[in-house]
Amino acid sequence: MTALVRHAMHITDGLLLDPVALRDQLEDFEETIAEHTGDEDPDLDDVAVRLTPLDPKRPARDLLEDLLTGIHGCWLLHSESAEPDDEDEDLGSAEDWDDEHQRRSRERFAHLVRTTAATHHDRLI
C-alpha cells in the first residue's frame, strides 16, 4: 500500500520513476484497444491514460476510501449470506428486526475480521 501512495506522490511531483514499465503498459493498452475496436492501428488521440491507480492529489485518502469501500462490500456480502441466529428471530417488528439484525451482523463481521487478522498476523505486516 505504501508503494502505491509513494508512486502517486512521485506522479504529483512530475516524476515517472519507471518509464520502461510505462512503455510496456502502453503497448499492452494499445493491443487491448485494437482488440476491442477491431482496428489494427487504433486512433489513441482521444484516449487518456492514468499514470497511477490513486488520485495523485490525495493518494492516502483515496487508498483509505477504496479500502473502506471494499470492507463495506465484504460486510454486505457477509450480511446477505449469514443465517439469522435464534436471537434475531425474537426481535418483533420488521423495522426493529432489520436494525438489530444489521447491528448484530456488523458485530459478527467485525469479530470475524479481527479473529482472522489475529490468526494471520504475520501476513499483515
Image (tube, grey):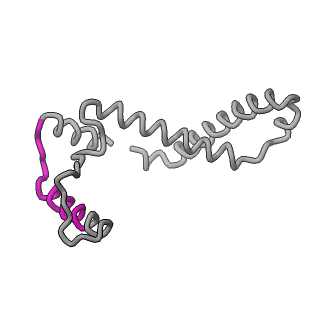
21 sits to left or right of 85: left
Count of numbered labels shown in the rendering: 0
The location of residue 59, given as percent across then percent down, is 29, 34
Which residue is pictured at 24% across the width and 35% down the height?
56
In the image, the segment drawn in magenta is 14-31
The location of residue 37, given as percent across then percent down, is 30, 66
Image quadrant where one finds the N terminus: top left
Which residue is pictured at 80% across the width and 32% down the height?
97
Residue 69 inside the magenta-drawn segment: no
70 sits to left or right of 53: right
User: In the picture shown, does residue 78 fall above or below 98?
Assistant: below
Quadrant in the picture for residue 104: top right
101 sits to left or right of 1: right
User: In the picture shown, does residue 103 fall above or below 49?
Assistant: above
36 sits to left or right of 101: left
Quadrant in the picture for residue 105: top right
| Residue situated in front as seen by the camera: 123 or 57 | 57
Quadrant in the picture for residue 39: bottom left
Which residue is pictured at 24% across the width and 61% down the height?
29
Residue 25 inside the magenta-drawn segment: yes
Image quadrant where one finds the C terminus: top left
The location of residue 14, given as percent across then percent down, is 11, 37
Q: Main secondary structure of the magenta part?
A: helix
Which residue is pictured at 48% across the width and 38% down the height?
69
User: In the picture shown, does residue 87 fall above or below 17?
Assistant: above
| Residue situated in front as seen by the camera: 59 or 44 | 44
